[in-house]
Image: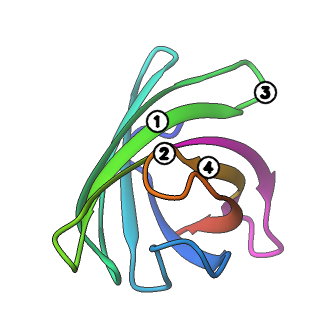
Amino acid sequence: MNYNNKSFKTVSNSDNGEVSGETIFDYKQEGNVLSGYYSGGGVTKGNLIGTVDEKGTIKMRYCHINTKGEIKTGKCISKPSQAANGKIRLHELWQWTSGDFSKGESIIEEV
């Protein structure tokens, strides 16, 4: 699985998350290294970095500035599936590594 030049939009997120349906993620991939930028909704600007394994699972770290001006950080594991429309869907288990250290789940889908 290669995520290079793919964009994703949030489909669902836990209540303690800050991304929403207005948040867009733009990914780049070189070999097994993934990087990305995201913004929209509760996020002013965000960055992520991670690795992709042979099954397309992403292990990443992320940081962003939210619309309140706070810097937030976290970690995430994203597992791919194929949506009914043929697009890539990523099922994410994440945890804040700042603030309350709470966990959550989200789904993002290729646009």
Residue placed under numbered mark 2 in the picture = 74
Question: Left or right: where does residue 106 sit relative to residue 34?
Answer: right
Mark pair 3, 1: CA separation? 19 Å
Residue type at numbered disc 2: Gly
Q: Residue at x 78, y 27 (%)?
A: 55
Q: Residue furthest front?
A: 100
Q: Is residue 69 above or below residue 34?
A: below
Which badge, 3 or 1, is on the more N-terminal residue? Answer: 3
SS category of the residue bearing label 1:
strand
- Name the residue carrying label 3: 55
Contact check, label 1 and label 4, Cβ < 8 Å: no
Of marks 3 and 1, the one in the foreground: 1
Q: Label 4: which residue?
A: 95
The amino acid type, in three-letter code, at marker 4 is: Gln
Sequence-earlier tag: 3 or 4: 3
What's the residue at 79%, 68% (across, down)?
83
Q: Which residue: 54% across, 58% down?
A: 100
**Cα gap from disc 3 to disc 2, whole angstroms:** 22 Å
Establish if 65 lies above or below 95: below
Tell which tag, 1 or 2, sits nearer the viewer: 2
- 10 Å crowding of disc 4: few (<14), some (14-19), many (20+): many
Q: CA distance from mark 1 to mark 2?
A: 6 Å
Check if mark 1's residue and mark 2's residue have beta carbons within 8 Å. Answer: yes
Pick the residue in front: 89 or 107. Answer: 107
Q: Mark 3 belongs to which amino acid?
A: Lys
Q: Secondary structure at mark 4?
A: strand
Crowding at dot 3, Cα within 10 Å, few <14 / some 14-19 / many 20+, comes out as few
Chief secondary structure of the magenta portion: strand
* Residue that carries the numbered disc 1 in the rendered image: 61
